Image (cartoon, rainbow, N blue to C red):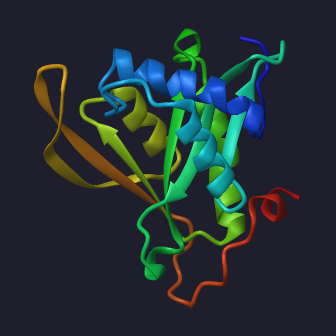
Amino acid sequence: MSALTVRRAVESDVPTMLAFANWAAMNTVANFATSPEPLEEWVASFRKSHEFFPWIVAEDGEGKVRGFAKAGPHKARGAYAWTADVSVYVDPEAHGRGVGSRLYEVLVPTMRAQGYVTLVAGITLPNPASERLHARFGFVRCGTFHRVGFKNGRWHDVGYWDLALRDDDSSPAPIRPVADALA
């Protein structure tokens, strides 16, 4: 695959991003959606969250989007403001070609620069490729929720990995906008 460029997603990227997520939902257990998710919901989520939660895409040398990573709130209550959930999806034609790594090479430092303290990733088990990707970036397995998703005729466990972006106990500063962290 030609060189990958990672950039901030724009709203016109959302249909392609959703296509990757819906492919995973319909063909794997990595995404727990049991039917295709509607574009309107993804566009609304993008509009609501992209200022403070990165949505990024990786493009190949021909400008074709090959994957995306995004972040979102971990939980709604105020004390969780410095924790975010992260996910990455790759074009099925580009699996195993470093797209996920390239995306996390940008996503993780961006979120550190924004002031996030902890990132959380949930991975349907087993998924050795995703587990290796997260371990490569310093995520540590911190727990497992057993039998939390029923899909394709059976129960699935979800493992959780977290990444500490800083190791001091000082009070955090307000989260910076994505645009400021990438500037």
Residue with the most extreme right position: 183
> Residue 162 falls in which quadrant of the image?
bottom left
Instruction: Between residue 168 and residue 130, name the one nearer to us.
Output: 130
Asked if residue 61 is positioned above or below residue 106 in the image, the reply reads: above
- Decide if residue 33 is on the left or right side of residue 176: left
- Decide if residue 41 is on the left or right side of residue 115: left
> Residue 9 falls in which quadrant of the image?
top right
Q: Residue at x 27, y 46 (%)?
A: 159
- Decide if residue 129 is on the left or right side of residue 57: left
- Decide if residue 9 is on the left or right side of residue 66: right
Residue with the most extreme front position: 40
Q: How many marks?
A: 0
Q: Is residue 12 visible?
A: yes
Where does the image place residue 93, in percent across and percent down from the top left?
A: 56, 9
Where does the image place residue 171, in percent across and percent down from the top left?
A: 57, 90
Where does the image place residue 12, in percent across and percent down from the top left?
A: 76, 31
Instruction: Between residue 170 and residue 123, name the one nearer to us.
Output: 123
Q: Quadrant of the C terminus?
A: bottom right
Asked if residue 152 is positioned above or below residue 89 in the image, the reply reads: above
Q: Residue at x 36, y 52 (%)?
A: 161
Q: Residue at x 33, y 20 (%)?
A: 28
Q: Is residue 67 visible?
A: no
Asked if residue 63 is positioned above or below residue 81 in the image, the reply reads: above
Q: Quadrant of the N terminus?
A: top right
Q: Residue at x 47, y 81 (%)?
A: 78
Where does the image place residue 114, in percent across and percent down from the top left?
A: 70, 67
Asked if residue 39 is positioned above or below residue 144 in the image, the reply reads: above
Instruction: Between residue 21 and residue 46, name the one nearer to us.
Output: 46
